[in-house]
Image (spheres, grey):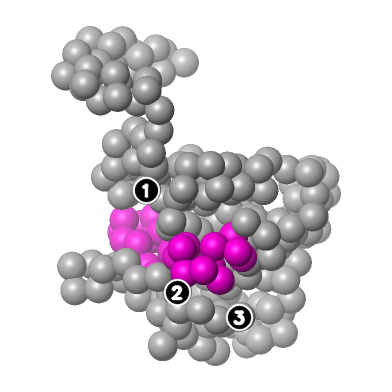
Amino acid sequence: MQKLADGLHKFHAEVCGTHQDLFRNLARGQRPEALFITCSDSRINPNLITQTQPGDIFIVRNVGNIVPPYGAGNGSEAAAMEFAVAHLGIKHIIVCGHTHCGAMRGLLDSAGLDELPAVKGWLQHAELTRRLVQENYPHIEGEDRLTITVEENVLAQIENLRTHPTIRARLARGELSLYAWVFKIETGQVFQFEASTGQFGPIGDAAPPSALPESTVYRRAV
């Protein structure tokens, strides 16, 4: 806790004073540009990897960056998405997974979750991901299988997003864009899904973030 306490002191001493205008504006309300749905994992920091300020992105975090289909479960994800899109007027939604995801590792080996019943129950919302990997990638093992699971899970959650009425209505009117990203922890790179190739490719100056085209289902090229 000492590290956190030292950070608080440094924040008040060095940051608050130089960002007074920012915090005064934030006190009047928020106008984030995007909804960023990602994992609870401590190794991914949405503001750090996008180099954004407080108030720039509306963040939803949970184990495995999962979006339960509309009507499933009683989590806060649906409420957060509805608030972000219908009330804040957000026009961009990013689902961002990450490499070495413990949730996806558990999804592939549910026997290892017997001592974590709440986690095991939550991961039932990612059953589509597990089935896709099991049926389409039986020949791939180890870390490669985990990476594929991470990628397929991001695409599965994009599909689940589309089941929510608020999201579906704005997509139909062309008022909302969806993005599928994966953060590679070991290099700091962010990869986006390209529907034209069926693969995740790095986002960079030559390939800026691109929204997914209107489609019912997105799948990796096997």
If you read the primary sequence from the N terminus, does the residue marked by circle 3 or circle 1 appear first? 1
**Mark 1 highlights which residue?**
33
**Mark 3 highlights which residue?**
217
Q: Residue 38, position in %: x, y?
A: 51, 51
Tell me the amino acid under the disc marked 3.
Answer: Val
For the question of whether residue 24 can be seen, the reply is yes
Q: Is residue 103 left or right of residue 151?
A: right
Distance between the alpha carbons at the discs numbered 3 and 2: 11 Å
Above or below for 101 versus 82: below
For the question of whether residue 14 can be seen, the reply is no
Q: Residue 57, position in %: x, y?
A: 40, 43
**Label 1: few (<14), some (14–19) or many (≥20) C-alpha neighbours in 10 Å:** some
Q: Residue 176, position in %: x, y?
A: 47, 62
**Mark 2 highlights which residue?**
212
The region drawn magenta spans 167-192
Distance between the alpha carbons at the discs numbered 3 and 1: 25 Å
